[in-house]
Amino acid sequence: MRDEVVLLDTVVPRTLDAVVAEFSAAAWRGGRVEAWVFEDVAARRAAELTLEGRGVAARIRSAYKPLVHAFLEEIEARAAIVGLPSHAQGSEQRFRLEAYPLGGLLDEIEFKGVGDELAYAVTTGTTTTRVFAPNRVRIDHIGRPTLSPCGWIRAWRAGEPAPMRDEALETEYEAVFHAVMSAVAAHAWGATTPCMDTLEIAIAIPGIERSLAWHDEVISTREALHEDLYFSVLDFFQHHAGRAAGDRTLQPGQIIPEIVASDGPVRVRVTLEPHRPTYHVAGDAGDLDIIERPLTAGEIATALAALGGESFVHHSVQGRPILGMHRRGTNPSVVITAGQHANETSGVVGALRAARRLIGETDMEFALVPQDNPDGYALHHRLRATNPRHMHHAARYTALGDDLDSRVAEPFYEKAARMEALARTGARLHLNLHGYPAHEWTRPLTGYLPVGFEAWSIPKGFFLILRHLPGLASAAEPFLRALTARLAQDAALRTFNAAQLAVWRAHAGAPTFPVFDGIPCMITEREGPGAPFQLITEYPDETVYGDTFRLAHTTQMNTVLAAAALVRAGMLDPPLLS
């Protein structure tokens, strides 16, 4: 086993402590200070009280999502008209999305006009309040200028009308991000890939972790730091390899930011380490119809074995089994896969439940791979132990760092299982069960919105994507309309989607996609191998539990069953595709 290589091991002082220490000095007595930091309300209020005890009037606000925090902490109103900040490097749409989920928390919100360059203008009744949104332009890790949230300080001496300081404040939150990215950039990476087995980024940091009274929405600076570090490091490797931004075929290795809570200075350690894979142990989840959390790998294996059929197996990069089963029967056939992105877990349960129903109620041929990406799934299980509700996109791709569906050359590893499933059946339809974040997805230190995934930044309910080969477009919309008509019979899903879409419209504007029976749908043409049609489900399931998880996997199951019934009815038969 190779030894670890340490790229960074350091401590970064806590900004809130530094602010209290600086303005506790006698020279500031009788003055006042305003600061914006990436800390929760309890820590900020404690710092204010300390300063007030030393003769300094203090107000310390959140630098992250300042408008939402203004309504949570200062503005007492249930309706508002909001003018958005306007800045050459930051669109009004970005600031409208940054105000999410006020459309769900308030009775009414309207975005109208603009405030100042870096401030929202909030009108409630006859009062207009200016809410500062501290941002600064920085050149990011691959040379792009970005307008990103930052710390800020304003301070007045006693009796002075103008602030002595009014400037950006480098917080520990920003400093640790840039320290990690600098350490990664400074390492002598080779020209071949994968560049490493795993890149571990371990950070203990204070911050915000606050659940909101809107679906599964949460404000989490630690989750946002995980997301920003994971995708920024991936950006760096794509740039280093001369690939286009967002390239899903690059195999840099496994990137693992693990961000945990602390109360004090930030501790950060970045290391290169060998794979140390763990393997599943046997388990039985019991009745899958009522399961309220993601299955373990052992429980997946047990549930799959109980289905019978012909089993087949392939292996992941780290040696974990990718299990499949083939049930022979009457054609036309379908293939069902789940967990391509391993932090999307509701499809795993939904696929297994649907397979059991297909066996019990039909003689239809199908093949099933319930968990496509076991290395990512194991990482998701590990990360949920410390942050159970985070979306954990570090577990999205394989241990090689690529998206398995984009893999085009041998060895295929994980992709080989779905390739065998398609070859065994000659399926007309591939049901590819996915999920996406159940709450807001941000990258606050590289422009706020997730680069390349801006359309996925806030939930819009359960939706469907139908991909088809050239020449098959005429069947797509009729199939989706028939499918959504069946799915919309579920009252719980209708209510869920209506609420999510209403708030999505408030923050993102009019939809650019069709909505059939309350379910957003997208139709795209694709090239390449695979089934003639691929139906991708997208349920906001990263990461939910309880009744929310049950509705998620029930919807996944119902989609498989309804789609399979339409296939059996001949809606995708070749004679219909003139």
Image: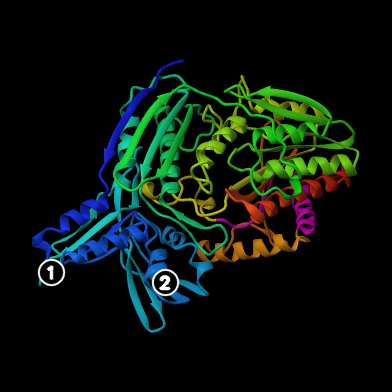
Up-down: is 494 above or below 89? below
Q: Please name the residue shown 38% across and 39% down the image.
A: 203
Magenta range is 459-487
Quarter of image, res 421:
top right
Tell me residue 54's x, y (percent): 16, 64
Quarter of image, res 496:
bottom right
> Secondary structure under badge 1?
loop
Tell me residue 363's x, y (percent): 91, 38
Tell me residue 319's x, y (percent): 61, 21
Q: Please name the residue shown 46% across and 34% down the image.
A: 256
Quarter of image, res 73:
bottom left
**The one of 134 and 53 positioned closer to us in this rendering:** 53
Q: Which residue is mark 1?
A: 30
Q: Please name the residue shown 50% across and 28% down the image.
A: 250
Residue furthest to the bottom: 126
The answer to whether 231 appears left or right of 574 in the picture is: left
Q: Which residue is mark 2?
A: 82
Does residue 406 appear in this view? yes
Tell me which numbered mark, 2 or 1, is placed earlier along the sequence.
Answer: 1
Query: What kind of residue is marked 1?
Result: Gly
> Secondary structure under badge 2?
strand
**The one of 289 and 214 positioned closer to us in this rendering:** 289
Q: Quadrant of the C terminus?
A: top right
Residue 162: say if magenta: no
The answer to whether 159 appears left or right of 176 in the picture is: left
